[in-house]
Image (cartoon, rainbow, N blue to C red):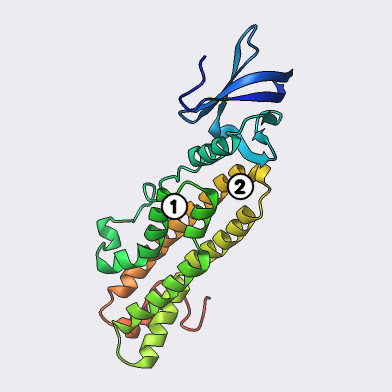
Amino acid sequence: MRLGDGMLSARLQGAWQDRSLDFDALVQLEQRMVQITFDAAMPKRIDIDVDDIAGAVLGQDTLTLHVRTGNPIVLYGSPHLEGLRHRLEAAVCVFPAQTLSLRGFGSERSAPGSEHDRWFEALLTSRRVAEETLTVETQRRAFDADRLARHAQLLRGELAAERVETPADRRALAAELEELAVPYTVALQRLEAAASELRHAPHGAQFERWRSWTGVVQRAFRAADDVWALMVPVLCDSRGAKGTLWRRILSGRSPRGRT
């Protein structure tokens, strides 16, 4: 194998499949696979799927790959290890689709339109930023839970104000929307906790923690989708806040709280 096309030469140490490693090696990241060729006398190759890498720690002249299914592998002696670390992070951080599995997003029963778009706007903006960036940190920052919660709260107030005139009725409708939105509020609280864990994750487990965080992001999308489905009948009720009592009775809820 010749050097080039993103391939680097480094010293390999560690263990793989019960074999001790201490060889000169050629390393290449090819289609989400780290390929390490070693032992010039009898060439062998280690293939590591990036999805099996829990983290990659860049030290002084070293890059340690923490593999979920084996021992850490250490590469050293190359001036290009930092570049490999960046390319590896970009390969890992392909942001997964978030809306394909949603039941109501964009469907007719979810009343797609300007208000539907306003409800999902902050989440979709965060998703777009995350899809355009390829680092753990920039994706984490894109989904700021506090910003998403403020957007939802402000929008609920705007939707109530657009439907009823008197301050008391606006507050009543906003309160009802807030109650319906509890699952999304809780999901964002969990997203904030997951983001904190990701931010403070040791580098050796950073990619693994990122994968868990993306799952929490997905659950926030699902919660937003479910909550929007609950809010649509309320927002479409021509009685506005005056229909609150009857909606509570029909849904089995007390007008002063849950029964």
Could you tell me if residue 88 is visible in this image? Answer: yes
Q: Amino acid at mark 1?
A: Ala
Name the residue tied to disc 1: 130
Q: Is residue 192 above or below residue 74?
A: below
Residue 162, image x, y percentages: 29, 82
Q: CA distance from mark 1 to mark 2?
A: 16 Å
Mark closer to the chain start, 1 or 2: 1
Q: Is residue 77 above or below residue 130?
A: above
186 sits left or right of 24 in the view: left
SS type, badge 2: helix
Front position in the image: 26 or 220: 26
Residue 30, image x, y percentages: 48, 27
Front position in the image: 230 or 72: 72
- When asked about the image quadrant of residue 242, the answer is bottom left
Identify the residue shown where x is 69% and y is 18%: 23
239 sits left or right of 57 in the view: left
Instruction: Report the label total.
Output: 2
Question: What's the mark number on residue 209?
Answer: 2
Residue 62, image x, y percentages: 68, 35
Q: Is residue 66 above or below residue 132?
A: above
